[in-house]
Structures are given as C-alpha cells and as structure tokens.
Image (cartoon, helix red, strand yellow):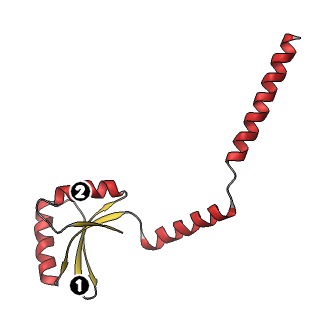
Amino acid sequence: MKIHLIFFSFLFIVCVGSFHTSAQTTQSKEVTALVKKKRAYNKKNGFGFRVQLLYGEELAIRKVLKKFQSTYPSIQTEIKYDEPYWKAFVGEYKTRLEADKALNLFKKGFSSAIVVPR
C-alpha cells in the first residue's frame, strides 16, 4: 500500500512537472514576430556600439585618426561622411559597458569622444 502511494505521488509529480515545462516553451506570435523584426534590423544596420572621437572637417578628422592609430594601432577606425560633417569612429563593442570602458581609456587623449550606437 505504501509503495502504491509513493508510486502514484511520483507519477503525479512527473506529470505536473512535464506540463509546467511544456507551458514555458510556447511563445506567442507577437513575440516571435518581434524577434524576427529585431534580427532583420540587426542584419541590416548592425548592432552594438562604437566610440565617436570627433566630428567636423575632413582634415581635422584625419589628423585625429592618425594620432589615435599611432596610440592604439590594434583598434579598428573608420571615417564616415554624414552631411555636413565628417565623423571619426573607433572600435566595435557588443555592449554599452564595453564601449564605456573603452571610452574611459580614450578620454585621456581625446576629450570629445562619446559612445554611439552602431
């Protein structure tokens, strides 16, 4: 009798546990659609953060990037023209925290640097 009670209790717990687990894995159509939109946006626009060193005239930007590259040769740099200004971007960071850490390092020599989304 005691064995039957233990067996049925165990069986009940397993059934309830499996029902609870399957209920957690279902997603609504809205969530699935949002995840799909986010992935498409990231694929088109990229994701993450960069540090913008400076914006202004092209010659000033090139001069600042040359100084940056001599100080930090392993960090990727990019110049972009966004009318009416040229912008100097450095680094590729997945999280805002990583970008902020790099910004603290760069601020010593480049005081106008800011973190911007990719």
Quadrant in the rendering for residue 90: bottom left
Identify the residue at horizontal 68%, vertical 59% (top origin): 28
Return the residue nearer the eye: 60 or 104. Answer: 104
Of callouts 1 and 2, which one flags the residue occurring earlier in the amino acid sequence? 1
Residue 72 position within the rendered picture, expressed as x and y whole percent measured from the top left: 16, 60
**Side (left or right) of 48 relative to 102:** right
Amino acid type at image mark 1: Tyr
- Whole-angstrom CA distance, mark 1 to mark 2, is 24 Å
Identify the residue at horizontal 34%, vertical 58% (top origin): 96
Q: Secondary structure at mark 1?
A: strand
Quadrant in the rendering for residue 6: top right
Number of numbered discs on residues: 2
| Extreme-top residue of the structure | 2
**Side (left or right) of 111 relative to 118:** left
Which residue is label 1 attached to?
Answer: 85
Image marks 1 and 2: residues in contact by CB distance under 8 Å? no
**Side (left or right) of 103 relative to 2:** left
Q: Secondary structure at mark 2?
A: helix
Identify the residue at horizontal 68%, vertical 63% (top origin): 29
Which residue is label 2 attached to?
Answer: 102
Q: Is residue 12 above or below residue 100?
A: above
Identify the residue at horizontal 84%, vertical 22% (top origin): 8
| Extreme-bottom residue of the structure | 84
Disc 1 crowd rating (10 Å Cα; few below 14, some 14-19, many 20+) is: some
Q: Is residue 60 above or below residue 104?
A: below
